[in-house]
Structure formats: structure tokens, C-alpha cells
Amino acid sequence: MQERDVSIEVAPLGLFDDPRYARLALQHADEWRTAQPFPHVVIDNFLDPDVAGAVERDFPLLNDIDWVVRDNKNNIRRFQHDETKLRPLMRHMLRELNSRQFLLFVETLTGIDNLLPDPYFIGGGPHLAGRGDFLNIHADFNWHHKLQAHRRVNVLIYMNPGWQEEWGGHLELWNLDMTRCERAIAPLFNRMVAFKVADGSNHGQPKPLSCPSGVYRRALNLYYYTTHRDADEITDPHFTMYKTAASPHAVELGEDYRKSGRNGS
């Protein structure tokens, strides 16, 4: 593994003790509740600048570690949920994001109480995607068999200084019936995105990346769970469900029909 001079002292214990995070959670709680097409929040400059810079410098590169690789018709990307393969600073950061104080932040932001972290980082941890990589629109797996808990919230923190718009890599949020993308979120450096996990939370990065070779779209992915979920939100446990966009012809037919009803006598 290539050595880089990054000190764990840059990210001290209790990173999220800072009352700034409680204020951010309160400020963005209404945004979470009213966001479309499903509850989500985007917060820029999320981490302390020195901490964000240190985490970015410590983020494993393509040849630094053995990545878990996904390469199929639905996605091409890499991630690593085994923290023992990561440097001390990255492990420390992941544990801070699983800490009591960060859970309180996410609970206050979302209104979802009794959240549990995932100490196994199943499907989470650092994610790395390069030129041509993509992730089709999908709804996430909803059940953690080890924790016996419902997946409720995703938190992504992007680590991409100097990211260019033309490179793509936007996180797309699609409506329930898969007729349109409602929001596209660029993976800008130190941007935090949180969103609700449900069968209708359709999201992904479906357009292959156009970044130069050797440049990567990087994110820390954290997932949070509860042992209880309201009865009307419970569905059978399932793995990731990939979605297909509605055909333009079908969308047009539906719109024309509804228009005739609104304009009819």
C-alpha cells in the first residue's frame, strides 16, 4: 500500500460533538420532510475543511487496496466494507460516522428515532468509480440479516476536489413511476447527501462517467437501520432492485389521457 503523510490527529475523537451539526440537522429537517421525489437533504462543506482534506488524501486509490468489484449489466464500481483493509484515518472516520453523536445528528435531521449504525459496513465504506463506470437506477436492499434490522437512511459524503460538470457522476433521484429524474446531484467535494431508503427511493448514477483516466468519483457510504418500521412501510426483505425507466411512448399516452380529462366538458 502506498504510504501518504496523513495524521489521525487531524480528525480527533468526537468530531461530531461540534454543536454546528445539531444546528445543521435542525436547519435542514424541514427540507428532508418536503423534498421530492422522496425525503433527502444535500449539505455542502459538511466536514471541517482540514478533516475533509485529510480524509480525501487518505482515500484509497485504485491500487492501494483489494477492492470488492462489481462489474455487470447493472453497475461497474468498487467498494470496500472490510475496515481492516483501510488506513487508520479512514477507519477512524468511518467509526466517527457510526458514533452516538452522528446518529443523533441523523435522527434529528430525518425524524427517524432509534437508528443503529452498521459496524459491518455491508455494501458501504469507501466507494470508487472511474471512467465508464455507472450504477443503474435502483432501490436499495432493505434488510440487514446480521443486525436483523430495516435499512432506513443512506448518508454519502463525496471526496472529489475539482470535479467538473462535464464528467457527469451525478446522483439521480427518480420519481416513483420511473418516468423522470426529479433531481441530479453533482458529487462535489465535501458534499453530504442523505436520503430515505424505501422501495420507492429510486436512485443511481446511470450515465457512465466521463472523467479522465486516473480520476475517480469517490464517496464514503454509510447506512443506518432500525429494528422497528411502521407497518405500512414494511415490505418483504429483498436485495437491490434495479428499475427500468418508463417508455417515452407510455408516458406520452398517460399525459395525453390526463390532459383530455382536464380539458373535457
Image: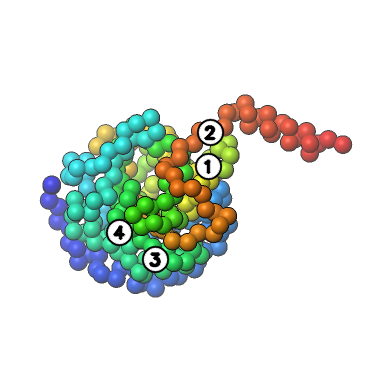
The answer to which of marks 4 and 1 sits earlier in the sequence is 4
Alpha-carbon span between mark 3 and mark 4: 13 Å
Q: In which quarter of the image is residue 7?
A: bottom left
List the residue tagged with mark 4: 119
The answer to which of marks 2 and 1 sits earlier in the sequence is 1
Determine whether, in the image, residue 138 is placed left or right of residue 126: right
Q: Is residue 71 visible?
A: yes
List the residue tagged with mark 3: 103
Q: Is residue 191 visible?
A: no
List the residue tagged with mark 2: 245
Q: Which amino acid does label 2 sit on?
A: Ala
Q: Which amino acid does label 4 sit on?
A: Pro
List the residue tagged with mark 1: 174
* Residue at left offset 34%, top offset 72%: 17
Q: What element carries label 3?
A: helix
Q: Which amino acid does label 1 sit on?
A: Trp
Alpha-carbon span between mark 2 and mark 1: 9 Å
- Discs 4, 1 touching: Cβ within 8 Å: no
Alpha-carbon span between mark 2 and mark 4: 34 Å
Camera-nearest residue between 247 and 168: 247
The answer to which of marks 3 and 2 sits earlier in the sequence is 3
Camera-nearest residue between 126 and 68: 68
Q: Where is residue 219 in the image (x, y as percent from the top left)?
A: 33, 49
Determine whether, in the image, residue 145 is placed left or right of residue 113: left
Q: Is mark 1 on a helix, strand or loop?
A: strand
Label 1: few (<14), some (14–19) or many (≥20) C-alpha neighbours in 10 Å:
many
